[in-house]
Image (tube, coloured by chain):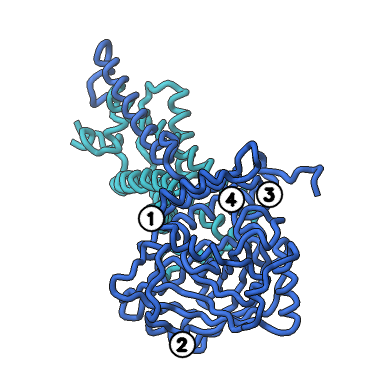
Chain colours: A cyan, B blue
Amino acid sequence: MNRPTSLFSLPARVLHWLMAAMIVAMLFIGVGMVASVSARHAWLVQIHKPLGIAILVLAVVRLAVRLRRPPPPLPADLPAWQKLAAHASHWLLYALMIAMPLIGWAMLSAGGYPVMLGASLRLPSIVAASPVVFALLRHLHTWLAMLLFFTFVAHLAAALHHGLIRRDGVLSGMVGGRASR
Amino acid sequence: MNPSPSPLRGARLVGASLLIAGVVASVVGAFAYVGGWLAPDRLTPARIVDQFQRNAGVFPGYRRNHAKGVCVTGYFQSSGEAARYSVAQVFAPGARTPVVGRFAIPGSNPYAPDSSVPIRSMALRFALANGQQWRTGMNAMPVFPVSSPQGFYEQLEAQQPDAATGKPDPDKIAAFFAAHPETAAFRVWAKTAKPSASFATERYNSLDAFLFVDAGGRAHAVRWSMVPQTLDAGASTPARDPDDLAADLQQRLARGPLRWRLLVTLAGPGDPTRDATRAWPAGRATVDAGTLTVQAAEPQASGPCRDVNYDPLVLPDGIEASDDPLPAARSAAYASSYLRRTSEEAHLPGAAREPETER
């Protein structure tokens, strides 16, 4: 059965899975590096910054892809609250994947740190140095990371619910498996 | 319409639900483990900083260690000689790099008398013309007492004042030294070390090893020292007044700038880079990288060093971390200290406040 409308576009699927790996890695790197005093701390921080900027760039591309090629509609029989939760969580994920790197960048700027993405690649500061702004953004970075993590967990659980229990083609629309046959 | 089988029922629904719950629990559990919440024994930056607070109390807005200090400003004039070993712009021939620095004494109490410890420290932030920075924190002692973050934490624990006496328990300190023979070299030095009455006459050492990377991409293991060009009795006159050091610095700067030579020591084959308790043999090749000129001092509460975290891993292109485990731990702990004191500065909920009855 060929149902092209139930499938996410190829760019959307590639970006989804690539960014899924990057964002989940980023969450674990972030939470791990601030809880470590070993050499891990240093190299995780070195990965965290360029990976964050890469996510920011890809998130903007992905937003453009989504606006040009809307995703397949949710199943008509999905309860209204689940539809609402799906749409709200998707837009929350988009908002966070753009906001988190920007907050990290602004936070380092406010802390007076050079924003280094590698040994010599440096981004300009986007916020004037200020300890108060630094502290606010640094805490915001942590709390929004927790929100992003739990939104990801809910997203994962919902995807498995669609794929294993409802078996309604929503998951395969992103996996690109059965629905593309 | 639906391309898949109908929704699950009965035992298969239970099985699928359990599978999903298991996946969610595994992901949340892995996250909690990596974040340290399920591993309370792991040494974290927060535990190190907490121990500093247990030892000396909380002084809102101040650094959790080296709390008492003074800001200085000046510049570094490169001799060009270190450019053979590092591409860092700060070492380029003729380069003149502005510096915001800080002299301090170890300890968490910003009101401690200068005579309370024999160690003085110099922290520097070089602002390179290309926008990169080099931050370094050096101490006026020949070796570090311990070689690992764990050893450092155990030393802090041993120094925690006893609840009954208000003083560290000598037995615990003796037990710590017995368990950490690597502290021997430091203890030999500390036995005869006198608290200097001047920051100006001290030699400040990186103690930790770093890598200089040259234009060919080759790495050179180095340690560095700021060698004083002020040679008088300052170093041998013990501090008397609680705030001798800041007063001495102001008096000297009123007469003219103070200078240090940046001496970079190149490791010989087999010299330990991962053990700051061991000095490298005398006679190692050194490079005179240039001269630090300190022109002015300001109180730390209003000076330009106040909001600088002297994180030793803020390094420019051409300087890298070595396998020395201490700089990563310092970087992590300094970040925790910096967040606490900036949160206090911002009066965020949950941040420590200055008690209203005091001062």
Q: CA distance from mark 3 to mark 4?
A: 14 Å
Residue in the foreground of this view, choosing between B67 and A80: B67
Q: Are dots 2 and 1 in contact, CB under 8 Å?
A: no
Residue B12 in which image quadrant: top left
If the image is split into quadrants, where does the N terminus of chain B sit? top left
Image position of B116 (left or right of B322): right
Q: Quadrant of residue B2?
A: top left
Tag 1 and tag 4, C-beta contact below 8 Å:
no
Question: The residue marked by circle 1 belongs to what chain?
Answer: A
Marks 2 and 3 sit apart, C-alpha to C-alpha, by 42 Å
Q: Residue at x 62, y 60 (%)?
A: B117
Q: Secondary structure at mark 4?
A: helix
**Residue type marked 4:** Leu
Residue B339: which disc?
4
Inter-mark Cα distance, 1 to 3? 29 Å
The chain that hosts pointer 4 is B
Residue B59's disc is 3
Mark 1 or 4: in front is: 1
Disc 1 marks a residue whose amino acid type is: Ala
Label 1 sits on a secondary structure element that is helix
**Chain containing mark 2:** B
Residue under circle 2? B80
User: In the orientation shown, which residue stands out farthest toward the top?
Assistant: B10
- Please state which amino acid type lies under the numbered disc 2: Gly
Residue at 70% across, 76% down? B296
Q: Which of the two marks, 1 or 3, is nearer to us in this view?
A: 3
